[in-house]
Image: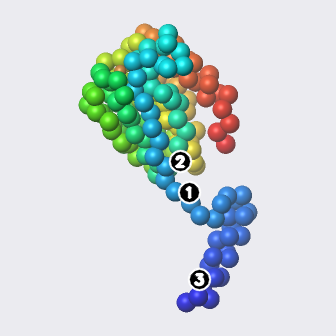
Amino acid sequence: MPFHFTRRAAIATSAAALLGRPVMAQEPVMHEVQMLNVDPDNPRARQVYIPRILVAQPGDTVKFVSVDRGHNSESVPEMMPDGAENWEGAINDDIEVTVSVPGFYGYKCTPHASVGMVGLIIVQGDGMMDNREAAQGVRQRGRARQVWDEIWEEVDGMDLA
Ligand SMILES: [Cu+2]
């Protein structure tokens, strides 16, 4: 029924215009996070995720790529939004994680968390800030504490709205 289709489309268009958003939902994106022994831009930084802060949209996939051996990605349950699924990759495995719940996702390399191999995924959308404080409030150990301080400071400077 072309008439109904057109009318519905027109309503959707005006609603989207009111919200200041594009009419069509964004296509899901595949992001990559590299697991590395050395940061290519800073040889003094060892055991790193690049990028260590990633901004994604609900429905996107994050692929952790085992560029160097000996690493994995494991979500930190206390640093996950309510309702989001935890993950635990095996050492040396590339894994793909689809993120659907807005919020802050903290993760770590199981063998290297204590030397600061940690990272953050921020999924934008309604409720994004709900676990922001809880994630930052998690007690960190060793070098991870310093890295998380740097991460949260960087997050504070980001325009995430
Ligand atoms: Cu590692």
Residue type at the position of mark 2: Gln
Q: Secondary structure at mark 3?
A: helix
Tell me which residue sits at (44%, 21%) in the image: 48
| Residue 111 x %, y % | 31, 18
Q: Secondary structure at mark 2?
A: loop
The residue beneath circle 2 is 57
| Extreme residue in the left direction | 90
| Residue 88 x %, y % | 30, 33
Q: Residues within 10 Å of mark 2 (few under 14, many from 20)?
A: many
Residue 80, picture quadrant:
top left
Is there any visible trace of residue 140 in the rendered image?
no
Q: Observer-nearest residue: 123 or 129?
A: 123
| Residue 114 x %, y % | 38, 13
The residue beneath circle 3 is 5
Residue type at the position of mark 3: Phe
The residue beneath circle 1 is 26
Q: Is residue 155 above or below residue 61?
A: above
Residue type at the position of mark 1: Gln
Residue 16, picture quadrant:
bottom right
Q: Observer-nearest residue: 41 or 3?
A: 41
Q: Observer-nearest residue: 161 or 133?
A: 161
Inter-mark Cα distance, 3 to 1: 21 Å
Earlier sequence position, callout 3 versus callout 1: 3
Q: Secondary structure at mark 1?
A: loop
**Pointer 1 with pointer 2, Cβ within 8 A:** yes
Quadrant of the snapshot with the N terminus: bottom right
Q: Is mark 3 within 8 Å of ligand 1?
A: no
Is there any visible trace of residue 96 in the rendered image?
yes
Quadrant of the snapshot with the C terminus: top right
Q: Nearer the viewer, mark 3 or mark 1?
A: 1
Tell me which residue sits at (30%, 23%) in the image: 69
